[in-house]
Amino acid sequence: MDSALSDPHNGSAETGSAANGTTRPPSTPEGIALAYGSLLLMALLPIFFGALRSVRCARGKNASDMPETITSRDAARFPIIASCTLLGLYLFFKALEREPWRASQEPRGRSCEGVNSAKQIFSQEYINLLLSMYFFVLGILALSHTISPFMNKFFPVNFPNRQYQLLFTQGSGENKEEIINYEFDTKDLVCLGLSSIVGVWYLLRKHWIANNLFGLAFSLNGVELLHLNNVSTGCILLGGLFIYDVFWVFGTNVMVTVAKSFEAPIKLVFPQDLLEKGLEADNFAMLGLGDIVIPGIFIALLLRFDISLKKNTHTYFYTSFAAYIFGLGLTIFIMHLFKHAQGPGSHHLTASVLSQPALLYLVPACIGFPVLVALAKGEVTEMFSYESSAEILPHTPRLTHFPTVSGSPASLADSMQQKRAGPRRRRPQNPSAM
């Protein structure tokens, strides 16, 4: 998971100018302001609309839109899994950059051709091509799911809309288990076709606009469909990724290296030289999707908490949303302080320092601001006792701790006890057993 806000192209051009003999023209203040302002706006859009859609997702009945609930155990494991994945990608790309294997270690004869073929297959170009195909499919599905609610408004009333269901099961009889259960209609197929156009554009050109369309779709779907079950789980997840982000950005150059080598729409980019070169600009600032999705699912949780209070206010949602703006703005400001401290002609700062771990600033802001508001309003207990998973699919019966239930769910518990205490049909006794 990439989660660093950086200026990779500009920074690498500055440090490599002496060796290459060429220098990239410095970005204008207007271009830099436009680039980072656009990144901030693009980060806010999937968080805002994804949080709103997460509420409808939690109340929906469509099996294809069921959210994935993140528990405290999942939150504790995630930074470890992300670290192993990131380190594995780093070692893999570093191995591809090394010199070819020594001739003395290569087998002779016909087997040498097989070794050369293996080196070609596992070259960085083929790996990036494989990743491009993978994200081509994922991007089309994510973008189609994103634009589907907006496109429904443009279809005429008499549009011939047919319902479809894609169902894969495992086993038979009572042991049958659903693997995939996806419901869609003709309108979804139209959205899928439109998304495929963007997918082909990305696959052929790798254009930054196509990259951002896929990145925004991934971010919005992540905020919408990934649900934290409570605030404590959110604090565990954000706290763990806080350490993860700081270590892999400041402690090593692993994250920056993977972000530059990984050709996939896992980051939002915007050119700083757009005013000079137009759509063909190539001096990009970037923001990892992890800096959007991880705080975004916490902000969406606070929106659902606001709704559960039934006070017709979204205090905690707007507070955390403002905290995200503050944290990301502070990240950009600190990054440019380091950049100006380096000065022209000085190369003592590494790319890891020029790239800032955004979660270093986002996590304290997104957690601290809402908690302070809760302390001021005396709602800390309600905040940390709120269970989002209890509101997912309310039409589905759920068993809680019983037989004793206290508080507002008492009426539900009574109704369940009445059903259990109702008349039951006695099984007829076997005459042979008498």
Image (cartoon, helix red, strand yellow):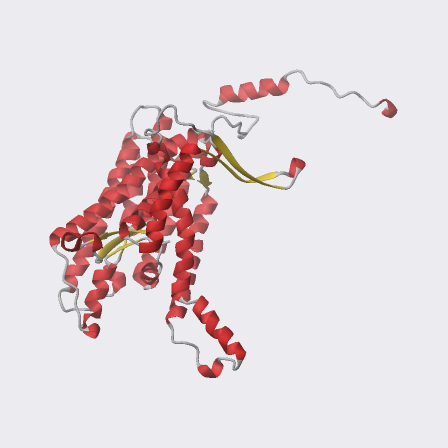
Q: Quadrant of the C terminus?
A: top right
In the displayed structure image, the side of residue 149 where residue 180 appears, left or right: right
User: Where is 98 relative to 199, above or below?
Assistant: below
Q: Residue at x 30, y 49 (%)?
A: 210
- Residue 428 vs residue 175, the one in the foreground: 175
Q: Is residue 265 visible?
A: no
- Residue 177 vs residue 121, the one in the foreground: 121
Residue 336 percent location from the top left of the image: 18, 56
Q: Residue at x 55, y 18 (%)?
A: 415
Q: Residue at x 43, y 46 (%)?
A: 75
User: Where is 162 relative to 137, above or below?
Assistant: above
- Residue 427 vs residue 413, the one in the foreground: 427
In the displayed structure image, the side of residue 109 where residue 58 appears, left or right: left
Q: Is residue 257 visible?
A: yes
Residue 183 percent location from the top left of the image: 48, 34
User: Where is 115 relative to 155, above or below?
Assistant: below
Residue 251 percent location from the top left of the image: 32, 62
Q: Residue at x 54, y 25 (%)?
A: 404
Most extreme residue toward the bottom is 104
Residue 139 percent location from the top left of the image: 38, 47
